[in-house]
Amino acid sequence: MASITIRDVYKSYAKMQVVHGVNLDITSGEFVVILGPSGCGKSTLLRMIAGLEEISGGTIAIDGTVVNKLEPRERGCAMVFQNYALYPHMSVAQNIGYSLKVAGVPTAERTQRIQAVARILELEQLLDRKPMALSGGQRQRVAMGRAMIREPKVFLFDEPLSNLDAKLRVQMRSEIRKLHRRLNATSVFVTHDQVEAMTLADRLVVMNGGRVEQVGTPGEIYSLPASRFVATFVGAPAMNMLEGKVVLDGLSLLGGSRRLAVSRAGLPVGTKVAVGIRPEAVRLVAPGTPGALNATVDLVEELGAGRVVYVDLDGAAFSVMTSEAVHPAPGSAVGLQFSEADLHFFSSETGSRLDVFKASVPVPAL
């Protein structure tokens, strides 16, 4: 186990900067997931920790030792990639133990450690097989075993589940989490999949455009997103957003057709604000219900245990997630009802969260 300290780290290629001043503290034994869209810099940051990418500026320390100038093999990290990278001519046992063989570890000790890793990963019956005779999930476990046998200070996972089908991804998520509990090893996991991120992480690091948008537990990220990007990236379907503007008596929404009676908290009249609410916080009610917003159903997606209803709200796309026994037809009128306590407010200019508003009851525009 080891702590990781990242201070003002950036990465540039020629004149283009792709990672901008990242600061992050990862405690010993923590499972941290770096989440973000393609091209946000998450894999580049992971590769800088591993030593596979040079650091353009700043420092990375593992267990208090700055590793900027250390070779990858000197950092005490083991990496699991999206591609399994197994030797096809070697057996499972030979693949797992190859690094020990190269290091000159005696055969007896090597065999003992291979058996121990195979027990943990439930690969004991597969040790004599070649990779071609394994399923995708089994190959990924062999790749994890090859990392584990080195007894590293830090495990680094670069989108290791992306090549697996949906069922195997669920299974491997569970296995990775149980393995982490057993080994209590410091782990950094990179993914663009928010479900993987939310289910695996002790803490999430959300990145966008080479910058860290927010660091927090999955619950904190979901309930209190620090920016409009985090709010709309984490959560499926994405958080609904309505454009608003500060007026004398609160916020004007939907081009003035609705108003929220909120405290302006010193914001000047005319300031543009985005108002967000999660689809599961919205209830479908009869059209014309007092206090409800009237909308027209565009599409209904059935999910088995519930459904997602996509509606048109005065020209704005809006989604509702519901498990209630309501099945509105496309083209039908519905009402949307929600608690103002579930609203999130963001600056339209910067995207940053605004906690200055306190909503009361929406009232019709005059």
Image (cartoon, helix red, strand yellow):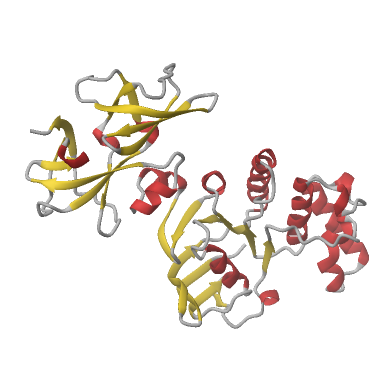
Locate residue 63: give its quadrant.
Answer: bottom right
As rendered, which of 9 and 179 lies closer to the eye? 9
**Rendered view: 25 above or below 277:** below
Q: In which quarter of the image is the N terminus?
A: bottom right
Q: Quadrant of the C terminus?
A: top left
x, y percentage for residue 180?
Answer: 64, 51
x, y percentage for residue 116?
Answer: 82, 53
Count of numbered labels shown in the rendering = 0
x, y percentage for residue 318?
Answer: 35, 36
**Rendered view: 323 above or below 100:** above
Q: Is residue 146 left or right of residue 273?
A: right
- Residue at the spot 24% in from the left edge and 34% down from the top edge: 340
- Residue at the spot 17% in from the left edge and 47% down from the top edge: 245
x, y percentage for residue 154?
Answer: 63, 63
- Residue at the spot 52% in from the left edge and 74% down from the top edge: 60
**Rendered view: 5 above or below 274:** below
**Rendered view: 110 above or below 318:** below
List the single residue furthest toward the front.
331
Locate residue 30: give its quadrant.
Answer: bottom right
- Residue at the spot 53% in from the left edge and 56% down from the top edge: 32
As rendered, which of 66 and 84 lies closer to the eye? 84
Q: In this view, does 337 lie to the left or right of 103?
A: left
